[in-house]
Image (cartoon, helix red, strand yellow):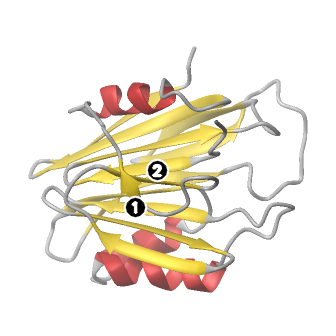
Amino acid sequence: MYIGRFVVVGPGIGAYRVSSRSFPNRRVTERDETLTVEPTPDAPTTDNPYVSYNCVRVVSAPTGEPVAVLGNGSHVDPIAEKIERGYPARDALATPLVALDFEKDDYDTPRVAGVVGAETATIGTVRRDALLVEAVDEPTMVATYETDTPARYDLAASDAAAAASEVLGADFEHPVCAAGATVDGDGVSLAIDNDT
């Protein structure tokens, strides 16, 4: 089954996977506590605005709490900025999702995102017919297609590298690359799996 891009979040852990039929030549790179989806050097040139974006950002809430923000597009940055300004996770997710709305492509692709703290997690999506944002206490997934409503996800991983590899290897079609994050009192750990 093809479910497109998806995010999984639970308290202390999160993962994001790119699945793509149209743009498979992509990878995740890291710079300054930010993970970015970008074309590989051999990828065909495209002007599609949804191909490159930050998929994970590490920020600190005003309380000093470390937080990871994960998602499938340009909404990750304003969500992260709102967390830094002290917005509750629910509001930090909802405001940019409503403002940017679903992607204006041929499929009206939903935007998916999650906010992970050491003890908390919140997941959200905006699609043509709904905005859904909810706090979760166990690993929960939302995808751009098919599973576009948050649903429980059996994530066995306990560290960032295992989370990235586990979602990349999940039994959904067209895997491309993945990212993982874990959050505890000491900070955020990040990992990448580019299936190389």
Left-right relation of 97 to 187: right
Nearer to me, 8 or 187: 8
Indicate which disc residue 146 carries: none
Q: In which quarter of the image is the C terminus?
A: top right
Q: Is residue 38 above or below residue 185?
A: above
| Residue sitting farthest toward the top | 196
Residue 87: % across, % down: 31, 84
The answer to whether the residue labelled 1 contacts the one labelled 2, judged by CB atoms less than 8 Å apart, is yes
Q: Residues within 10 Å of mark 2 (few under 14, many from 20)?
A: many
Amino acid type of the residue that numbered disc 1 sits on in the rendered structure = Gly
Q: Quickly name the residue at label 2.
A: 7
Residue 162: % across, % down: 32, 26
Nearer to me, 73 or 122: 122
**Which residue corresponds to the image point at 33% horizontal and 75% vertical from the top-left?**
83
Q: Circle 2 sits in a helix, a strand or a loop, which is it? A: strand
Left-right relation of 94 to 59: right
Left-right relation of 148 to 94: right
Tell me the CA gap for discs 1 and 2: 7 Å
**Which residue corresponds to the image point at 62% horizontal and 29% vertical from the top-left?**
175
Q: In which quarter of the image is the N terminus?
A: top right
Residue 134: % across, % down: 34, 73
| Residue sitting farthest toward the left | 185
**Which residue corresponds to the image point at 68% horizontal and 72% vertical from the top-left?**
102
Q: How crowded is mark 1: few (under 14 residues within 10 Å), some or many (20 or more)?
A: many
